[in-house]
Image: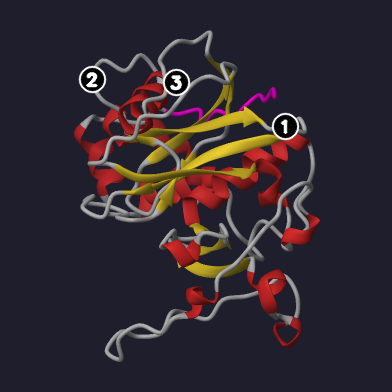
Amino acid sequence: MEYERTPLGKRIPRKRTAAVAIVLFVGRLGDLYVLLSTRASNMRSYASDTALPGGKYEDGDEDEEGTARREAYEEIGLPMDRDKVRKLCLLDAFLTGNGLIVTPVVLLVTDNALNPVLNPSEVTHLFSMPLTAFLHSHPSQIPGWHFGISTRILAQGPPDVPPPPRVGYAEGEGEVGGKEGRYYQFRDVTWGQGVVRMHRFLTGREGGGVKPVYGLTSAILIHAAMVGYDQRPDFPVFAPGQHTVQERIEWEVINGAGPLRRAMEAEGMLGDWDEAKAKL
C-alpha cells in the first residue's frame, strides 16, 4: 500500500496532534484485516467505543509514526520492532470534534507469530475485520467474511434515555431489513459551518457488547480501504456540500473558539493562517 498524503501546509501545535495505528495483517486468502479494540469503560474519553490504537502526541515521540507505534505498544502490546511491524504509509489527517489533528499510520504485521498483550486499563477486547468491509453497505458483498448479527443490538434502553437520532441507509428505508440492511448506516451532523457524514458499520459482535465502528474510526477506515484497494465504496462518502478536512480545520482556527484555536494563539501560529482567513 502506497499513498502520498495531502500536507496541511501550515504549522499545528504539537499538543493538538495525535495519531492512530491502522494495524493490518494478511488473512489466509491473502486479504487484509485490520485490528480493532474496545476501549476500557473507565477511559475519560470515548469509553467502551470501538477504536483503533492511538492517542495524543507526547514528548519523546519522533513523529506521527512514533506516536502511533508507542500507543499501539501501550494498548495492545504491538512490538516496536520495525522489521516485524512495517510502516506502509501515512494517510491524510483528520479533524476530531475536540480539535485534534489525527494522522492515521498504516502498519503491516509481517510476523504471524505475534501475540497481542492487552493493557486492561485501556483496552478490554481486540478483534479484526476485513479492511474491504469498509467499502460495502451489505455484508454479503464482502469477500470471504461470514457476518453474523445478534438481535440484542436492538434492545431498548431505560425510559428516561432519549432515542438516538434518525439515521440514513444506503437504500430506501422501506427496503431495509435483517442483517443486510442494518450492517451499514450513516448520519449527517452539523459541524462548524456545514455538515459532516458519520458512517456506522456493525461488527457482528454487538450481542457481546462490542459497539459498531462509528464516526472518526469509520471515516479513517473508509479512507484506508479506498487507498488499499484503489476502489470507491458503494455508498457516498461525504454529505452533500461537505467541506474538506483542510477547510474545516481552517474554519476551526479562524472562526472557532475551541482548544485548537487557543493552542494556536498561545504558540503564536495564527499568522500562518492569514491567507486562509482572507479566503473565508
The kind of residue tagged 2 is: Asp
User: Which amino acid type is marked by label 3?
Assistant: Glu
* Residue position marked by numbered label 1 in the rendering: 28
Relative depth, front residue between 93 and 204: 204
Marks 3 and 2, how far apart at CA: 14 Å
What segment carries the magenta color? 1-10
Location of residue 150 in the rendering, given as x and y in whole percent from the top left corner: 55, 70
Q: Secondary structure at mark 3?
A: helix
- SS type, badge 1: loop
The circle drawn on residue 59 is: 2
Q: Of helix, strand and loop, which one carries label 2?
A: loop
Q: Looking at the picture, how far across and down is residue 271, in whole percent?
A: 35, 32
Q: How many marks?
A: 3
Give amino acid for label 1: Arg
Which residue, given by chain and number where applicable, does mark 3 sit on? 65
Q: From the viewer's side, name the closer residue of 257 and 176.
A: 176
Q: Main secondary structure of the magenta part?
A: loop
In the figure, is residue 156 to the left or right of 225? left
Question: Quick one: which residue is furthest to the bottom in this view?
Answer: 159
Q: How did the renderer colour the structure?
A: secondary structure
